[in-house]
Amino acid sequence: MKRNKLTMYKVKDIGGNYLFLLPFLVFFCTFTIGPILYSFFMSLHRWPILAKEHPFVGLDNYRALLKDKIWWQALRNTLYFATLTAVTTTIFSFVLSNFINNLKRGANFYRFVFYTPVVLSVAAMGIVMGWTFNTQYGIVNAFIGLFGIAPVNWLGSKELVIPSLSLASVWWGFGGPMIIFLAGFQNLPSSYFEAARIDGANNRIIFFKLTIPLMAPSILFIIITQFIAHLQVFGQSYLITGGGPGRESYTTIYYLYQTAWRYYRMGYGSTIAIGLAVIIFTITIIQYLVGNKRAKVEY
């Protein structure tokens, strides 16, 4: 009897906790899990948006995706962009946050200035960066012109278009990771650094042998979240380059948009979405396992 009473008390306590979670769980299942399952269902059908019937095709859409040259090109562009942007953002925000953390005066001013671009919408950022990299009137070409360098077609070159979009994205989004790194720096135990200086360590040794290992969890978190976010890039290629030149800045989400909302092939568009979701999930797990192992070794 006592065991039954204890079990009932535990169930009541746990049940109360789940009642608090229930609104979020309903929202999550309705607007996240539901659409994912329905998208997978659509990917198994030929689904012209205006047709009344949607015939079942099984895995034909997935077989077509594996042979789709545009998909593979868009995926390469996306992986290139995501890797370049995530690494650059992490390094840039880490260095700037370390700089701000060491300031004795003016830290709040720099924090405000560097974070400001984050509040811009992707549309505003696209317009600003489109003009910034403009071949004839852009500020980037005006700056390099001061050194006698001829204007560069940043957005019209197949070699430079992805790095240019990446640079625009870094400028737009590095403020968020910078704030996270600042919080990490401010929570580092000062006793470690005092002991290192007493032992004769200089700033370079402290930075590479102490600061970076202690910040490894934050670095891992930023790299993974930034990589996942930039695998879903759409606005930059849509607003700044329109996927050009040619298809050199096509991304998977841009290809999905073109397939589903320009050509109204909802079934194949859902297949592209599921394919990208599987790739993101796989890469995330690999990054987490490898990064977590390295972080433990660092400690």
Image (spheres, grey):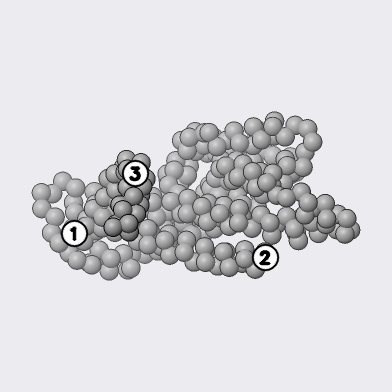
Within 10 Å of disc 3 (Cα), the crowding (few <14, some 14-19, many 20+) is few
Within 10 Å of disc 1 (Cα), the crowding (few <14, some 14-19, many 20+) is many
Q: Amino acid at mark 3?
A: Gly
Residue positioned 33% across, 68% down in the render: 66
The answer to whether residue 102 is seen in the rendering is: yes
Q: Is residue 222 left or right of residue 298?
A: left
Q: Nearer the viewer, residue 36 or 248?
A: 36
Secondary structure of the residue carrying numbered label 3: helix
Q: Is residue 139 left or right of residue 166?
A: right
Indicate whether 86 appears above or below 146: below
Q: Nearer the viewer, residue 118 or 219?
A: 219
Q: Which mark is residue 216?
A: none
Spatial CA span between label 1 and label 2:
49 Å
Residue 55 place in picture, x, y as percent: 13, 59
Q: Is residue 174 left or right of residue 64?
A: right
Q: Nearer the viewer, residue 80 or 42?
A: 42
Question: Quarter-wise, where is residue 272 in the image?
Answer: bottom left
Residue positioned 58% across, 57% down in the render: 220
Image quarter of the C terminus: bottom right
- Name the residue carrying label 2: 298
Image quarter of the N terminus: bottom left
Secondary structure of the residue carrying numbered label 2: helix
Residue 203 place in picture, x, y as percent: 83, 53
Residue 181 place in picture, x, y as percent: 64, 47
- Name the residue carrying label 3: 16
Query: Do tag 3 and tag 2 residues touch (Cβ < 8 Å)?
Result: no
- Give the mark toward the camera: 3 or 2: 3
Of pointers 3 and 2, the one earlier in the residue sequence:
3
Residue positioned 53% across, 33% down in the render: 119
Residue 226 place in picture, x, y as percent: 53, 51
- Name the residue carrying label 1: 45
